[in-house]
Image (spheres, rainbow, N blue to C red):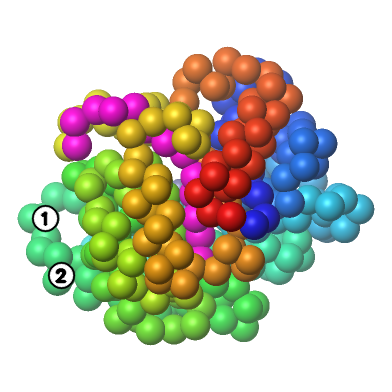
Amino acid sequence: MKLCFNQGSCDHCPDHSMMADLEAAEKYGFDYIDLRFDVLDEYLKDHTAEELADWFKNHHLKPSSYSGLLFFNWKKTEEEKQKVFDEVKRLLPVFDTIDLRTIAVIPSFGIEEHASVKEIKDDAVYMLNQIADLCEPYGISLALEFIGSGNFTINRFDTAYDIVTTVNRDNVGIAIDLFHFHAMASDVNDVAKCDGKKIINLHLNDVEDLPIGAPYLDDSKRLWPGEGAVNKQGLADALKACGFDTEAIPAAIEVFRPEYYELSVDENVKTAYETTKAFVEKYLA
Ligand code: ZN
C-alpha cells in the first residue's frame, strides 16, 4: 500500500512551509502528499503551479488529494452556490498542472435550519453533481468526507455512502477518516457490505478514548495511527470484505494534534511515516 502524508498534520509546526513539508515527506519515504487548501493558497501567492509541478517531476513524492473543498453544501442562495463552483473553477487548472486528481469535499456545519436527512441528501446530491460536471473534463474525482461531529450536515458513513451511491458517478466517491468514523459511531457493518470501489480516500489517525458525542471529542484529540480507541481491526476487516483497493488508494495520515505541532516538521513527518507504515503493515497488508 502506498503511504501519503496530509499536510494538515504539520501545518502549525514552527518551521512549516510548503517546501519544508514536501522535502521532509520525500526524505522519510512517503509516496504521496495531500495538499492542504490554505498552504497551497499561501504558496501560490509567490509561486506558480508550474514551479510546484516541476518539483514533483523531479521527486518520488507525488500529489494525491486536495484537502479540501470546504463547506460545499447547504448553500441557501444561487450566489452562494456559484461561489462554490467558482472556487472549483479557480482550482481545477492548478490541480491539472500538478497532476492532482482527487478533491476531498467537506460538508457545511452549524446550519440554522433543522434540516432532515433527506433534505440534506437531496441538496448534497445536486451540489456534488454540479461540481462533478466541472471536474469530469479534467479526470478529477470528488471524495465526500463525512465529518464526525453532530454540528456537521453529513457526519456518518451511512449518510455519506447513501449520497454517493445516489449520485452514482465514476468520479464521485467517499473518504473514510478513522477519527470521523469513530467520533459519530459509524458502523463497520455498513462498510463491510458497501461497494469498496466507492472508497477513494482513506485518512489514518487514532483518537483518545472519550465519550461519543462529547463536545470535546474534537480534532485536537487525534493521535498517531494505532495509539487510541478506534476499532482498527473491525474497520480493517470491513475494508477487506468490501473490496477496498489497497493498491490504488494510498493510506494518508492526517492528525491535527496541538502537541504534534510543537515538533519540528522533520520530527513530525518522521513519526508520521513510522506510525503510518506500522499501521498499514499490521492492519491493511
Ligand atoms: Zn480527513
| Point 58% across, 63% down: residue | 246
- Boundaries of the magenta span: 199-212
In-front residue for pair 83/251: 251
| Point 47% across, 26% down: residue | 257
Image position of 261 with respect to 10: above or below: above
Give the amino acid type for the residue marked by disc 1 in the picture.
Glu
Q: Is mark 1 within 8 Å of ligand 1?
A: no
In-front residue for pair 86/275: 275
The quarter of the picture where the C terminus appears is bottom right
Give the amino acid type for the residue marked by disc 2 in the picture.
Glu
Q: Which residue is mark 1?
A: 113
Across and down, in percent, residue 93 comes to: 68, 67
The quarter of the picture where the N terminus appears is bottom right
| Point 24% across, 28% down: residue | 210
Image position of 282 with respect to 129: above or below: above
Q: Is residue 146 left or right of residue 35?
A: left
Across and down, in percent, residue 179 comes to: 37, 42
Q: Is residue 268 left or right of residue 283?
A: right
Q: Which residue is mark 2?
A: 119
Image position of 184 with respect to 101: above or below: above
In primary-sequence order, the first of circles 1 and 2 is 1
The quadrant in which residue 161 appears is bottom left
Q: Is residue 91 left or right of residue 180?
A: right
Q: Residue furthest right?
A: 58
